[in-house]
């Protein structure tokens, strides 16, 4: 299992070593976990092999830091609060539609496991699919696939035809060892389409970089950092979002700020913390309102096929033995299960090389501009779109 793809993979708050000390600005105690002496020794042994600036794409990481799910499933965290963007196409003002999309985007970062954990790095050809059943009887559908292994690229697609919402994108993480931390530059983008407002086109949202700090000393913690952009070219709306990392002597964890523009004119400010409350201030009226409160927001559950009906390379079935071992805290069995999946991946790659063939993604195709899009033409009629998407994603498993 590679430590690469730290960004978007690692989750949680801080992991304290026994005997470590935190201050009043530290993360909440509920977000911490403890490394025992053996686990700490394993980490130190691994780190002793690393060099500053080293690419971590091929570095194997111990199983006790793994979250028992694939990164392809982890991306569904961004589909946790659909009510924030459902109906955004009905907003008459472009600024309001943009804010609704921006709120959806910001709401996905708080969902995380306890401690500094990372989901499994997907293998080439692996896919994850699920369905969302909403309270009003409507549904949403999600499919993600690992379309490239070197470099690692995960493509994903979500649609709720009845709610006139479509989301697609790709993640292209690149990780580096920086000494007491590991950084991941998150390339790719998240694109939101309000199907009831086709003239708006795509709302394009970048990703912040991620930092796992305190690897050698101090408290281990995940931070989002740096600036990313949210843009809708057709309406002229944009926002430069800064995810702030805590300073050594001052500052706080998980803070964000942003400047919303309409054309070249600043119209509002984003402030708050991505793991608790976020607010928007209208610069013309001075009105301040809450965008999202993660402490009061239930996560939308998803429905998957039972594992015995899933295909061989479907995420939950593929990693089933590893997930069971992790949940049972059986690290020996976890290492064995992880190695089995990775060894099969290497064997498949060797066979393709021998035959001179390349892997062809099942659900997605690449565009000349580097974007990955689904291999499906969605009908404009919501009812027909629903049928089309169900057949494309589920095939013979339309009813489950």
Image (cartoon, rainbow, N blue to C red):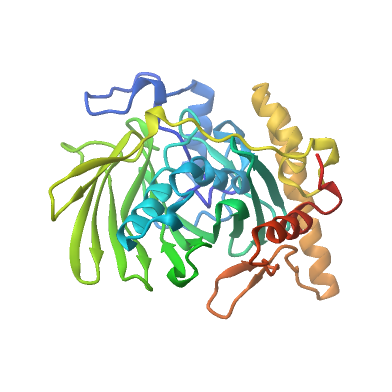
Quarter holding residue 301: top right
Residue closest to the eye, 203 or 46:
203
Among all residues in the image, which is located at the extreme bottom?
Answer: 368
Residue closest to the eye, 359 or 81:
81
Q: From where the camera sits, is residue 124 visible?
A: no
User: Percent from the top left, x then y, of residue 77?
Assistant: 52, 42
Horizontal side, residue 234 vs residue 112: left or right: left
The relative height of residue 163 versus residue 196 in the rendered view (above or below) is: above
User: Percent from the top left, x then y, of residue 116?
Assistant: 46, 34
Q: From where the camera sits, is residue 18 visible?
A: yes
The relative height of residue 97 versus residue 332 in the rendered view (above or below) is: below
Horizontal side, residue 269 vs residue 78: left or right: left
User: Could you tell me which residue is drawn at 57 percent across and 43 percent down?
Assistant: 74
Quarter holding residue 58: bottom right
User: Percent from the top left, x then y, of residue 361?
Assistant: 72, 65
User: Could you tell me which residue is drawn at 79 percent across and 35 percent down?
Assistant: 306
User: Could you tell me which residue is drawn at 69 percent across and 70 percent down?
Assistant: 377
Image quadrant containing the C terminus: top right
Residue closest to the eye, 227 or 137:
137
Give the mark count: 0
Residue closest to the eye, 209 or 289:
289
Quarter holding residue 370: bottom right
User: Could you tell me which residue is drawn at 35 percent across and 70 percent down?
Assistant: 235
């Amino acid at each position: 299992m590679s430590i690469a793809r730290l960004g978007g993979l690692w989750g949680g708050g801080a992991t304290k070593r026994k005997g470590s000390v935190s201050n009043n600005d530290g993360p909440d105690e509920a977000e911490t976990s403890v490394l025992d002496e053996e686990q700490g020794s394993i980490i130190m042994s691994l780190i002793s092999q690393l060099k500053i600036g080293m690419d971590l794409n091929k570095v194997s990481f111990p199983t006790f830091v793994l979250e028992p799910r694939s990164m392809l499933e982890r991306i569904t965290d961004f589909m946790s609060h659909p009510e924030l963007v459902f109906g955004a196409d009905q907003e008459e003002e472009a600024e309001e539609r943009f804010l609704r999309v921006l709120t959806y985007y910001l709401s996905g970062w708080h969902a995380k496991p306890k401690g500094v954990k990372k989901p499994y790095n997907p293998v080439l050809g692996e896919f994850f699919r699920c369905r969302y059943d909403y309270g009003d009887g409507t549904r949403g559908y999600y499919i993600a696939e690992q379309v490239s292994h070197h470099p690692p690229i995960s493509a994903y697609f979500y649609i709720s035809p009845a709610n006139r919402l479509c989301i697609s994108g790709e993640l292209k993480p690149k990780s580096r060892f920086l000494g007491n931390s590991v950084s991941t530059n998150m390339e790719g983008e998240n694109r939101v389409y309000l199907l009831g407002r086709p003239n708006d086109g795509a709302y394009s949202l970048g990703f912040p970089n991620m930092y796992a700090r305190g690897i050698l000393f101090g408290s281990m913690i995940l931070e989002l950092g740096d600036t990313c952009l949210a843009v809708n070219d057709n309406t002229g709306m944009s926002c430069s979002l800064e995810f702030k990392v805590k300073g050594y002597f001052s500052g706080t964890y998980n803070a964000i700020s942003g400047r919303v523009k309409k054309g070249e004119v600043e119209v509002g400010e984003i402030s708050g913390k991505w793991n608790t409350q976020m607010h928007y201030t209208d610069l013309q009226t001075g009105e301040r309102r809450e965008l999202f409160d993660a402490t009061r927001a239930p996560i939308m559950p998803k429905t998957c096929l039972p594992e015995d009906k899933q295909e061989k390379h479907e995420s939950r079935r593929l990693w089933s033995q590893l997930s069971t071992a992790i949940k049972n805290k059986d690290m020996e069995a976890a290492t064995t299960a992880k190695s089995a999946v990775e060894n099969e991946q290497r064997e498949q790659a060797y066979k393709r090389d021998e035959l001179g063939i390349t892997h062809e993604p099942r659900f997605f195709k690449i565009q000349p501009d580097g974007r990955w899009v689904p291999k499906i033409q969605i009908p404009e009629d919501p009812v027909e779109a629903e049928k089309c998407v169900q057949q494309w994603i589920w095939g013979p498993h339309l009813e489950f």
